[in-house]
Image (tube, helix red, strand yellow):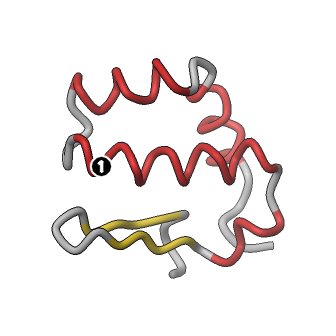
Amino acid sequence: MKTKWGSCNPEKGTIWLNLELARKDIAAVDYVILHEIAHFVSPRHDTTFIAVLNHLMPNWRQIRADLNAAPLTD
């Protein structure tokens, strides 16, 4: 996976994570996992999806910004 931190297939119940996450802060790893799990609740980035993130990780926007500011590969 060269362009994304994670991906999932809610229909099959599978999640894939970019191995580069192992080099990132644990909060970033938690965010990506939560992001993918939230797709099991809502497959789109809609208000339901955002509500899951807001409820379980109120600071997810800052963590996402920090993660996306760093290169995908070092």
Q: Residue at x 23, y 26 (%)?
A: 48
Depth order, front residue of 16/65: 16
- Say what secondary structure mark 1 lies in: helix
Q: Residue at x 34, y 66 (%)?
A: 8
Q: Which residue is mark 1?
A: 39
The three-letter amino acid code for the residue at tag 1 is His
Answer left or right for 58 relative to 67. Answer: left
Residue 19, given in percent of the width and then of the height, sits at 67, 78
Answer left or right for 39 relative to 26. Answer: left
Toward the front, the furthest residue is 13
Residue 17, given in percent of the width and then of the height, sits at 55, 71
Image height of 40 relative to 11, above or below? above
Image height of 61 relative to 2, above or below? above
Answer left or right for 7 relative to 27. Answer: left
Q: Residue at x 59, y 74 (%)?
A: 18
Quick one: quadrant of the C terminus? Answer: bottom right
Q: Residue at x 63, y 35 (%)?
A: 65
